[in-house]
Amino acid sequence: MPEVVSLVKLGIPNVQPVSDEMANRWANGLTDSAVYLHQQLRTRIPDAGEFEKLVADGSSKKWSPMIDPAFVSKSERSSGDIITMQGANLKDAYGKWDAKVALAFETVDGVEAKRFKDQVQNSKDNWVSQVEQKTLRMTGDKIRGLGAAPIAGYWLSGDLRASGLLRENTDEVVQGGPVNVARSGLRTMLKAGLIQKLVQSGVLITKAGYTPAVVLAHNTVINDFIKGLQDPAYVDFQPTVDPVKSYCLFIWEEPLFRLEIQVVTV
């Protein structure tokens, strides 16, 4: 008879503030590497021919499948015309790109890549805003505590450290504890892959305004991923709440967002 052996609810904060140390580390890492980044960029794209091959042609190949073959614009350009024009415009853009790169990394007042470094510092507030409202909500950090995504990865791979990562007044253990649901030899793969998918899905669900269809679509992908690696000793993971089924789900109950995990034995 099916038995719930683990049930945990992991809260996801609306905003996870970025520490000053983290923001400074991001900015300083880029500014300290500015000269090296410029050298690598010039090595990778030394001339117009390489720009055309790597940037223009590469972009056109990835972008063109997104245009409906039957589409015709108001100016009566076919999809083929649009793709051709976009590719041609990119190929002609090397001069502008080269000039902008040279300007950004130019030595000014004795400071190498001064404009690039200034731009990084000026962008720090925007980077902080983006990270704390999106990725960091899911991941947390090692200093102040990991978030729902890594805790879930630890939890479903049976890593006992997961219990010590639970956050007071944010997470709730309803039943049991961490349990390794992976088949033999797949524990590491499940843990790493699950964390990555949870972070990505959590951000996209947030961007979509927690629309039910989007939540269900991502929950389906997440549970299909787990099901492909899970031990048959557990009831298959599926994308909706069910008292006798295993699941790993994002749940939005305004104003609260959480990740809920249930593991049921066969």
Image: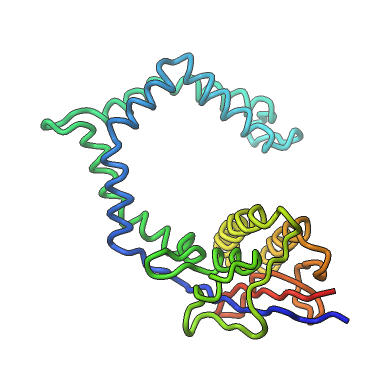
- Residue 59 percent location from the top left of the image: 56, 30
Q: How is the image coloured?
A: rainbow
- Residue 116 percent location from the top left of the image: 27, 37
Query: Is 65 located above or below residue 250 in the figure?
Result: above
Side of 20 relative to 44 (left or right): left
Asked which quadrant contains residue 72, the reply is: top right
Query: Is 9 located above or below residue 18 in the figure?
Result: below
- Residue 159 percent location from the top left of the image: 59, 67
Point 57% across, 76% down: residue? 10
- Residue 200 percent location from the top left of the image: 58, 56
Side of 52 relative to 188 (left or right): left
Side of 11 relative to 218 (left or right): left
- Quarter holding the N terminus is bottom right
Point 54% across, 19% down: residue? 53
Point 66% across, 67% down: residue? 156
Query: Is 207 located above or below residue 167 in the figure?
Result: above
Of 127 and 75, the residue lying toward us: 127
Of 34 and 97, the residue lying toward us: 34
